[in-house]
Amino acid sequence: MEHNKTMTILEHIAELRKRILLILLVFVLSMGIGLAAAPHLLSFLKLHSPAFQVNWNAFSPWDGLRIYMSIAMVLSLAPTLPFAFYQTWRFVQEGLSRQEKSATLRFVPFSAVCFVAGISFAYFVVFPMSLAFTGSINAQLNLAETYGVSQYFGFMISIVIPLSLAFELPVVVLFLTRIGLLQPALLRTMRRYAYLVLVIIAALISPPDLVSHLLVAIPLIALYELSAWLAHRMHRRQIAREQLQLQPDPADHAGQTA
């Protein structure tokens, strides 16, 4: 630590409140920007559907507003998540060494990359697969596919948001490992339970067939294993660095013998 200032419990609570309010402020401001960008993004999504061209219909006077708010919410997560990681770093930095501060700060841009990767995987892989599956069922039943815009985007967001948040797993695990709140051994111990949870999540957001489950579950499990491997590697480096710092300096030893 760079100084010995000790904060009371009330000061910690006040600091946490400040960080949460800043995150909420960024979320609200991002929502405003998202509302302005929503019409342009909606036009792009309608012309470039990853599965097939669809005609959207409004079945309620509130459908347009609901979609605007939904799109704005998704867009607002892109800047809010990295900012939330940054505020978390600011909150815990007093208990970190200078080297730990520098190392954990790098996770902030990494969280944005993981979020974009999660959205891309969900929208271009899982969402078309789910639409194709539901479309085939409708065709077998000779149903005319007339999509309500609210139902269409509700279906899409229910897939995109969980997967994009799941892709933040490596960032969360590495951050908690770096500040000492998570031990890599715990990840190995909880592996079977984590697999079960990830398979359940995959079943909930993918079409009800084995191939689709595997296409979603395998990347999620791979993310977990990648997180566990990176956390283990980081933990070993931390231990090696601490042991190196505890070793006596040969120059000092030579000076004493002289």
Image: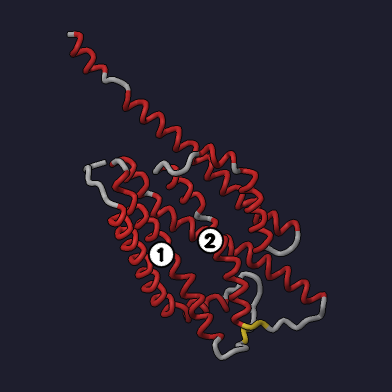
**Which element is circle 1 on?**
helix
Q: Report the disc number at residue 80.
A: 1
Q: Is residue 175 left or right of residue 93?
A: right
**Which element is circle 2 on?**
helix
Q: Position of residue 155 (x, y in %)?
A: 62, 72
Count of numbered badges drawn on the protein:
2
Q: Is residue 42 above or below residue 248?
A: below
Q: Is residue 70 above or below residue 13?
A: below
| Mark closer to the chain start, 1 or 2 | 1
- Give, as a three-letter code, the residue at label 1: Thr
Give the residue pinned by disc 2.
164
Q: Which of the pair 88/207 is nearer the observer? A: 88
Would you call the spot at circle 2 few (<14 residues within 10 Å), some (14-19), or many (20 or more)? many
Q: Which of the pair 228/176 is nearer the observer? A: 176
- Give, as a three-letter code, the residue at label 2: Ser
**Residue extending furthest toward the top:** 258
Residue located at (51% from left, 76% from top)? 70
Asked if the residue at tag 2 contacts the one at tag 1, i.e. Cβ–Cβ closer than 8 Å, the answer is no
Residue located at (52% from left, 58% from top)? 117
Residue located at (61% from left, 43% from top)? 191
